Image: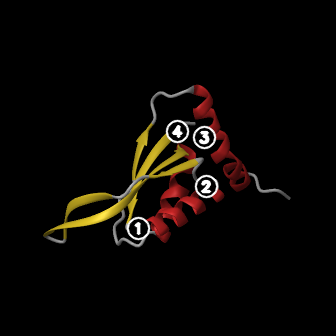
Amino acid sequence: MNMLLVLTNLPDRATAEALATVLVEDRLAACVNILQPCRSVYRWQGAVETAEEVPLLIKTSEARYAALENAIRVRHPYETPEIIAVPVALGLPDYLAWVMTETWAETLTEHWPSP
């Protein structure tokens, strides 16, 4: 199983904190870093736009990506949210194992429900 670093941006801190909490509580992420607001410049529907956004760095397992993406899409206020997953090629083995452990428990329940 591989670790992913997933990036997304939210329009404000309250929305970012709410999403981060749900992702960790539901074991879709082991950890979510909520960064300082940044200024984004992008083209949307033919016009150049700017917005202040709050970036999230989400640490998860590849096995949980589909459920994580769905959870973000359902809760994200943007019509087309940025959701980018980057594979983690190397890292401290103990940290990588921790991410796998924190996101694995829910996966077990989904594949092998308790009686």
Q: CA distance from mark 2 to mark 3?
A: 11 Å
Q: Say which amino acid is labelled 2.
A: Val
Which mark, by number, is residue 38? none
Q: Amino acid at mark 1?
A: Asp
Q: Position of residue 96 (x, y in %)?
A: 58, 33
Q: Secondary structure at mark 4?
A: strand
Q: Secondary structure at mark 3?
A: helix
Q: Would residue 82 be found to the left or right of residue 43 on screen? A: right
- Residue 12: mark: 1
Q: Nearer the viewer, residue 25 or 84?
A: 25
Counting other residues with Cα less than 10 Å from the Cα at mark 4, is it few (<14), some (14-19), or many (20 or more)?
many
Q: Which residue is mark 2?
A: 24
Quarter that holds the C terminus: bottom right
* The disc label shown at residue 99, or none: 3
Q: Quadrant of residue 41?
A: bottom left
Q: Nearer the viewer, mark 2 or mark 1?
A: 1
Identify the image quadrant of the N terminus: top right
Q: Residue at the location (20% across, 61% down)?
A: 42
Contact flag, marks 2 and 4 (Cβ < 8 Å):
no
Residue occupied by mark 4: 3
Asked if the residues shown at circle 3 and circle 4 are in contact, with their CB atoms under 8 angstroms apart, the answer is yes
